[in-house]
Image (cartoon, rainbow, N blue to C red):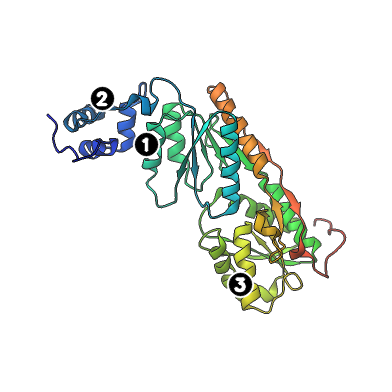
Amino acid sequence: MQQDRPANRRVTATDVAKRAGVSRSAVSRTFTAGASVSPKTRERIMTAAQELGYRVNMVARGMMKRTHLVGLVVSDLDNSFRASLVDALARRLVAMDFHPFMLPTDRDQNIEQLIDMMLRYNVTGAIVTSDTSPTEITQACADFGVPLVLVNKPRPNDLVATVTLDADQAGRLAAEALAEAGCRDVAIASQRRASYSIDQRKAAFVKHCQALNLTCVGDFQGAAQNYHGGIEAAQAMADRLTQVQGVFCVNDYLALGFMDWVRHHTHRRIPEDLAVVGCDDIDQAAWQAYDLTTIRQDTDRLAEATLAALVARIDAPTQAATHPVIDAQLVRRGSTARSGAVTSLPKPG
């Protein structure tokens, strides 16, 4: 007998999960062949499904055969670097006869919803580019045998591929660019929100500053690595701006806000008084209003390496995953063109 069936709409896995008192991913596992779920949980879910009249659409779920869907877990698409990377990934997936399936997320979203959606559509593989913690996604993909690639994330295990920018190289290039601009006291503009890739490049920058005899006076932060975060970081640095000659902004999007605040609210001139280096080389970095020296993170190379790693996971899921590292490149522009620039770097000491 069907009890409390939702009126005028199809019963969903969410309805079953609520009735059974379990997560939606548990419902998905129950109706996925070979997935792990305890007998007690399975019984509760099957009872709830029967009571509600829940029926799995086998065609929609692709349970009879593997689909060509690839889940793209993305966030912060207002950042043109993220948008360019997602565009490059999607275009290459289509060219390879895969079907990109975008799953936008943020830090406040219930990760169970993302996982449930990926599993309901039985994706062939998944790529995570967002700052969402990949732990739960990694475990769910492992449980269901879904090939997974993480972009600019730490390596969780030998069966998950990662593709990362060479953070040590990025930090070194930023430190060298400020040293060549004649800076001796420098600072970092970053964000409070945790980010593996950002934390790695900051640590590398500090290390290479020490090797170049540069003094890093501090890490001044905004809430997030975006335009408003750059404004907040500049405000946090306001009392120290006269003490530094150079700033490393952890990404270009943040650098734009930082530069605008400095120009409109202080007497410090860029680059005459303050050299600025960013990271990513988004399109806006080359705009005349910013002319930002930056560390290029090539989205085409990132996308190519990511899809090569994904195909390798699909073709050989039991073999150890690859972890390609993409070179960083310094792009010199006007934000470091100071009159005090030096022709050669000091010897590390």
Q: Amino acid at mark 1?
A: Asp
Give the residue at x 37% y 21%: 34
Q: Is residue 155 above or below residue 282?
A: above
In the figure, residue 241 lies in which quadrant? bottom right
Helix, strand or loop at label 2? It is helix
Q: Nearer the viewer, residue 150 or 15?
A: 15
Q: Is residue 222 left or right of residue 334?
A: left
**First in sequence: mark 2 vs mark 3:** 2
**In contact (CB < 8 Å): disc 2 and disc 3:** no
Instruction: Report which residue position mark 1 lands on.
Output: 116
- Residue 99: image location, x then y, percent: 51, 32
Q: Is residue 139 above or below residue 341?
A: above
Helix, strand or loop at label 1? It is helix
In the figure, residue 143 lies in which quadrant? top left
- Residue 251: image location, x then y, percent: 62, 56
In the figure, residue 218 lies in which quadrant? bottom right
Kindly identify which numbered label has been placed on residue 261.
Answer: 3
Query: Can the viewer see residue 219 in this picture?
Result: no
Find the distance from the CA under tag 1 to the CA under tag 2: 20 Å
Q: Amino acid at mark 3?
A: Trp
Q: Nearer the viewer, residue 180 or 219?
A: 180
Query: Can the viewer see residue 121 in this picture?
Result: yes
